[in-house]
Image (tube, rainbow, N blue to C red):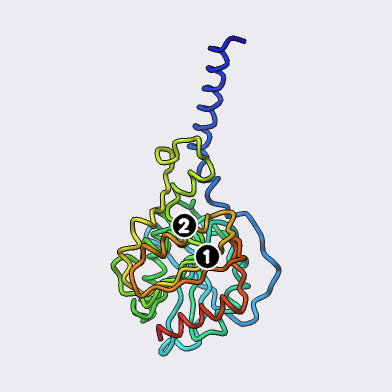
């Protein structure tokens, strides 16, 4: 085979992979069917509710309010994989803190209709805010908690608002930056549809912010969480764990930092 033919073959393969990445990129970003549920059961009762979006999608959500007058309410925005059940090990701990919470399942997740997109997830989160406000919970009594992909949504909706606080767990600077670490030989900036540019938005967050990240995160590099912390406005707080991977362990140290931050907002 001549050098020209070899180069043409390489180019053909490269273009084929590039087109595949472009057309199937959301299958590589959103994993609603992945189940890493540990089997842990809820150790308290929650209210299952349906939250309707402006484009007529009903989002399965779990609501828990033990003291809506004196406690803040967390809006929990989960990551890019799995169901609400996958977060039971977290909300079992949240129940023991001085806080209420609403955790929503994204469109296309947990049996919800629709397909996840950046624009769609922003609408889902904003619909949850409207739902809380309709229950008489003001903006300044809401804490936005984003997990992994949910940090991109949290950063978007927290801009120029008066939320009580913002919590970002294993955040990324932008999906473009994450994509470049996974596919360094492809034009990610040009190909990517859902960019979630948190590094360009975090300066617009005026609420107190807590950023949590594991230093051995193998999915989202630790430096991204550190960079967002450096970009964030005061008052800002961090919990950087030396041993945590992407799925941070809800151990005593993390829970103490979380509780201390939440209590500081009440």
Image quarter hosting the N terminus? top right
Residue 80, horizontal then vertical, whole percent: 54, 56
Classify 195 as above or below 151: above
Query: Disc number at residue 223?
Result: none
**Viewer-nearest residue: 157 or 238:** 238
**Viewer-nearest residue: 173 or 238:** 238
Q: Residue at x 46, y 57 (%)?
A: 224
Circle 1 residue: 213
Residue 105 in view of the camera: no
Q: Distance between the residues labelled 1 and 2?
A: 9 Å
Q: In the orientation shown, which residue stands out farthest toward the front?
A: 242
Q: Which residue is drawn at 31% across and 74% down?
A: 162
Q: In the orientation shown, which residue stands out farthest toward the top?
A: 2
The crowd level at tag 1 (other Cα within 10 Å; few <14, some 14-19, many 20+) is many
Circles 1 and 2: CB atoms closer than 8 Å: yes
Residue 76, horizontal then vertical, whole percent: 49, 70
Circle 2 residue: 224
Name the element at disc 1.
strand
Q: Is residue 34 left or right of residue 147?
A: right
**Viewer-nearest residue: 125 or 11:** 11
Image quarter hosting the C terminus? bottom left
The image quarter containing residue 140 is bottom left
The crowd level at tag 2 (other Cα within 10 Å; few <14, some 14-19, many 20+) is some
Instruction: Give the number of marks.
Output: 2
Name the element at disc 2.
helix
Residue 160 in view of the camera: yes
Of pointers 1 and 2, the one earlier in the residue sequence: 1
Q: In this view, does 259 lie to the left or right of 54?
A: right
Residue 253, horizontal then vertical, whole percent: 58, 77
Q: Which residue is drawn at 34% across and 76% down?
A: 139
Residue 168, horizontal then vertical, whole percent: 46, 67
């Amino acid at each position: 085979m001549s050098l020209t033919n070899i180069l043409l073959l390489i180019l053909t393969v490269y273009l084929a992979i590039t087109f595949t990445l472009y057309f199937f990129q959301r299958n590589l970003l959103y994993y609603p069917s992945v189940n890493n549920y540990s089997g842990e059961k809820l150790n308290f009762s929650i209210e299952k509710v349906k939250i309707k979006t402006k484009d007529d999608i009903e989002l399965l959500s779990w609501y828990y309010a033990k003291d809506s007058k004196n406690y803040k309410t967390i809006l929990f925005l989960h990551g890019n994989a799995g169901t609400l059940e996958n977060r039971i090990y977290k909300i079992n701990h949240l129940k023991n803190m001085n806080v209420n919470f609403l955790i929503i399942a994204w469109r296309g997740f947990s049996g919800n209709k629709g397909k996840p997109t950046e624009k769609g997830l922003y609408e889902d989160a904003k619909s949850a805010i409207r739902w809380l406000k309709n229950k008489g919970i003001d903006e300044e009594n809401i804490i936005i908690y984003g997990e992994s992909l949910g940090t991109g949504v949290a950063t978007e909706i927290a801009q120029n608002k008066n939320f009580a606080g913002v919590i970002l767990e294993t955040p990324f600077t932008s999906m473009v930056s994450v994509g470049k670490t996974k596919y360094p030989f492809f034009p990610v900036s040009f190909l990517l549809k859902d960019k979630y540019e948190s590094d360009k938005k975090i300066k617009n967050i005026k609420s107190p912010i807590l950023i949590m990240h594991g230093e051995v995160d193998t999915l989202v590099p630790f430096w991204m969480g550190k960079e967002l912390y450096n970009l964030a406005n005061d008052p800002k707080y961090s919990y950087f764990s030396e041993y945590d991977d992407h799925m941070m362990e809800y151990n005593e140290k993390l829970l103490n930092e979380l509780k201390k931050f939440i209590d500081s907002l009440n």
